[in-house]
Image: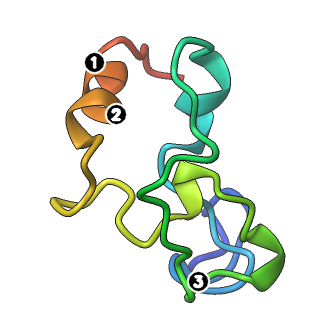
């Protein structure tokens, strides 16, 4: 069922694709590591606890204080 997902596996478990990962690599103006609001998402593997925003419990949720910033960057994307 989830085999077609990039990275394979369940969308919230081990081997899952992190939403927003592709646009982070193309945007050099936005620092995505070491922000003081970072709270690790315990649903991810422990080795992903690197303070990257995409591994934060609040990433792309209403609780993220930088949500507007991330959504602005999504507007700049073109489909693959």
Q: CA distance from mark 3 to mark 2?
A: 24 Å
Crowdedness near tag 1: few (<14), some (14–19) or many (≥20) residues, C-alpha within 10 Å: few
Can you give x and y, in whole percent of width and height, for residue 38 in the image?
A: 49, 61
Residue 75, numbered circle: 1
Q: Earlier in the sequence, mark 3 or mark 2?
A: 3
Which residue corresponds to the image point at 51% horizontal and 81% vertical from the top-left?
12
Residue furthest to the left in view is 62
Which residue corresponds to the image point at 77% horizontal and 83% vertical from the top-left?
46
Quarter placement of the N terminus: bottom right
Residue identifier under label 3: 10
Residue 70, numbered circle: 2
Horizontal relation, residue 64 to residue 23: left or right: left
Q: Secondary structure at mark 3?
A: loop
Say if mark 2 contacts mark 1, CB within 8 Å: no
Q: CA distance from mark 1 to mark 3?
A: 27 Å
Residue furthest to the front in view is 36
Crowdedness near tag 3: few (<14), some (14–19) or many (≥20) residues, C-alpha within 10 Å: some
């Amino acid at each position: 069922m989830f085999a077609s997902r990039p990275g394979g596996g369940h969308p919230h478990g081990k081997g899952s694709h992190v939403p927003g990962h592709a646009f982070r690599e193309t945007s050099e103006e936005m620092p995505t590591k070491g922000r003081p609001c970072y709270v690790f998402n315990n649903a991810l593997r422990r080795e992903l606890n690197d303070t990257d925003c995409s591994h934060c419990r609040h990433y792309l949720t209403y609780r993220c204080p930088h949500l507007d910033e991330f959504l602005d960057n999504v507007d700049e994307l073109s489909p693959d």
